């Protein structure tokens, strides 16, 4: 047992380590190489990109397509891209801000809208390559997993999902876009484990839950619940729905009509561009030799008269 003095001394005793300076030698700075710009800004996962872009040597320059899906706060962007030495080439693109043309004017960034954009880019791409009639896809939304099978003619259009730096958790919206592209007739390698409704313990997909999400029924349930419990919050939260006169019960008929409209005309219509009447110029117009000579003559006369 310690005496009182010894116990007090033991309590006050602290272990102190020597100060070690973190040295970065000149060799460190000479050999230092900065990372790629898009890696520094946290935009591109180059480990994933290498695997999405690199093609097998025995395929002799055959394009390797990837289906890029990106989300903003108000928009969904999908592109079919192929990589070349000179840079990436976008074959086709679809955006959720195009959906009002097909009858969907609200909820342009939710799960159901992501499915619609996936369906749109699949039909648009297949039409561009002349495969839309042979590969129709799954016309009725059942929620069951669908994989396109090769027909008698050309093989199906294959693209690999590119999610960027988004987290690929079960039920994420990127997989709603993937589901829309697969139902549209595009061959995107996948399995059912990340769709909404997949049961991890039972190891099976509940197709009814996935169908509910694709058709926007989860939004309709939330709308009904909020309208009954908090009417003021409902009017504020779903103000765009209220302005368009869309109720919770209308969503069940809205999304099938949007899917049908996309299949009827998936092509992008370019807006006519006209040259502005008063075209602005920010650079000085290059003068001819005669004009320069005349200007100089005027300046000399002005100096002489002054």
Image (tube, grey):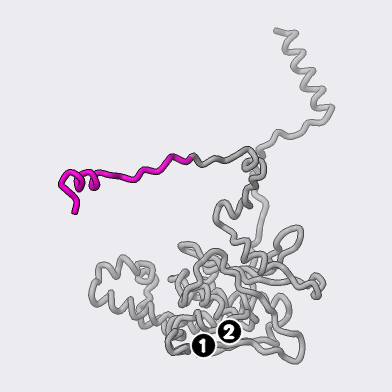
Q: Residue at x 52, y 89 (%)?
A: 144
Please tell me how many numbered marks the rendered image carries: 2
Residue 15 percent location from the top left of the image: 34, 45
On residue 141, the disc is 1
Viewer-proximal residue among 5 and 263: 5
* Image vertical order of residue 107 relative to residue 33, above or below: below
Residue 210 percent location from the top left of the image: 46, 84
Residue 3 is covered by the magenta coloring:
yes
Chain part drawn in magenta? 1-20
Can residue 35 be seen by looking at this rendering?
Answer: yes
Secondary structure under tag 2 reads helix
Q: CA distance from mark 1 to mark 2?
A: 8 Å
Q: Residue at x 47, y 73 (%)?
A: 169
Name the residue that disc number 2 marks: 183
Task: State if disc 2 and disc 1 touch (CB < 8 Å).
Answer: yes
- Residue 3 falls left or right of residue 195: left
């Amino acid at each position: 047992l310690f005496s009182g003095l010894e116990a007090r001394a033991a309590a006050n005793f602290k272990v102190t380590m020597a100060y070690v300076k973190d040295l970065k030698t000149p060799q460190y700075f000479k050999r230092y190489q900065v990372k790629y710009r898009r890696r520094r800004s946290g935009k591109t996962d180059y480990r994933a990109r290498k695997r999405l872009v690199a093609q097998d040597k025995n395929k002799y320059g055959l394009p390797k397509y990837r289906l890029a899906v990106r989300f903003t706060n108000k928009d969904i962007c999908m592109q079919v891209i192929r990589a070349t030495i000179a840079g990436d080439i976008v074959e086709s693109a679809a955006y959720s801000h195009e959906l009002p043309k097909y009858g969907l004017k609200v909820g342009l960034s939710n799960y159901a809208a992501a499915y619609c954009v996936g369906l749109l880019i699949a039909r648009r791409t297949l039409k561009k390559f002349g495969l839309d009639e042979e590969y129709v896809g799954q016309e009725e939304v059942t929620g069951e997993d669908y994989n396109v099978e090769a027909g008698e003619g050309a093989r199906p259009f294959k693209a690999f999902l590119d999610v960027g730096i988004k987290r690929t958790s079960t039920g994420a919206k990127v997989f709603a876009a993937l589901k829309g592209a697969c139902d549209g007739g595009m061959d995107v390698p996948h399995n059912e484990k990340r769709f909404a409704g997949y049961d991890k313990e039972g190891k099976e997909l509940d197709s009814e839950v996935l169908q509910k999400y694709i058709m926007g029924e989860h939004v309709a349930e939330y709308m009904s619940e909020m309208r009954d419990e908090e009417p003021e919050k409902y009017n504020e939260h779903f103000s765009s729905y209220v302005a368009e006169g869309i109720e919770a019960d209308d969503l069940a008929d809205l999304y099938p009509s949007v899917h049908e409209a996309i299949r009827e005309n998936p092509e992008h219509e370019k807006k006519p561009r006209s040259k502005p009447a008063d075209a602005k110029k920010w650079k000085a117009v290059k003068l001819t030799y005669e004009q320069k000579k005349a200007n100089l003559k005027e300046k000399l006369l002005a100096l002489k008269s002054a």
